[in-house]
Image (cartoon, rainbow, N blue to C red):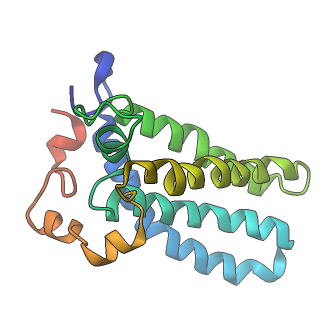
Amino acid sequence: MSGGKRGGSAMNYRAVNRIWQSATLFLAPPLIVLLVWFRPAMDLYQWLLCLHLPLLMLHEAEEYVLAPTGFKEFFNLKTPFGSKTDPDFPLDDAYVFQVNILIAYPIVILGAILAGVAPWLGFSMIWFELIINNATHTILFQASIIPSPTSATKCVVRPSWPDRIRAGSPDYAGTASSWTGR
């Protein structure tokens, strides 16, 4: 079943994911500017942990919006860990939402806020990203001889996402009805 609505969920995860994933492209640059502006008033460690949020946003935009194939589809169809036939299994849109919006973003934000009293919290997410994200993107996925969708060269050499936007692809452009699932 497509649309991220497995298990009878009333939420259209695919549409919600498209909104936050696309919004990261527009939110990250002003956040970086604000952080540069407020840098003198912040401790270096806290500033670096705050900088982690817009950098994570840019990574998410690269992974889900700018890449020719989103990470979920890439994982499910092209890696040894996916089903090879179902773009929504084993990872589905609800999984993408839960991992990013309910786990990653709160830990990054709380890590930056609590940098002075719980410095391990923000750094734990960095370690997780270094080990899990980098290992899977650069080592494990390379075993399939297919570049990860976040490989910068693939986005630069063959940036097909503008064509999909111009063509009105519902995966990228969407409509109000696709956002609400009606």
**Figure check: 96 above or below 66:** above
Q: Determine the residue located farthest toward the top in the rendered image.
A: 7
| Front-most of residues 73 and 50 | 73
Residue occupying image coordinates x 13% and y 56%:
169
| Front-most of residues 140 and 62 | 140
Residue occupying image coordinates x 76% and y 52%:
122
**Figure check: 55 above or below 32:** above
In the picture provided, is 86 more to the left or to the right than 74? left
In the picture provided, is 44 more to the left or to the right than 112? right
**Figure check: 19 above or below 5:** below
Q: Quadrant of the C terminus?
A: top left
Residue 8 percent location from the top left of the image = 29, 16
**Figure check: 128 above or below 41:** above
Residue 84 percent location from the top left of the image = 27, 35
Residue occupying image coordinates x 44% and y 39%:
97
Residue occupying image coordinates x 50% and y 47%:
140
Residue 116 percent location from the top left of the image = 90, 57
In the picture provided, is 45 more to the left or to the right than 175? right
Q: Determine the residue located farthest toward the left in the rendered image.
A: 167
Q: Residue 72 appears in which quarter of the rendering?
A: top left
Residue 117 percent location from the top left of the image = 91, 50
Q: Determine the residue located farthest toward the right in the rendered image.
A: 117
Q: Quadrant of the N terminus?
A: top left
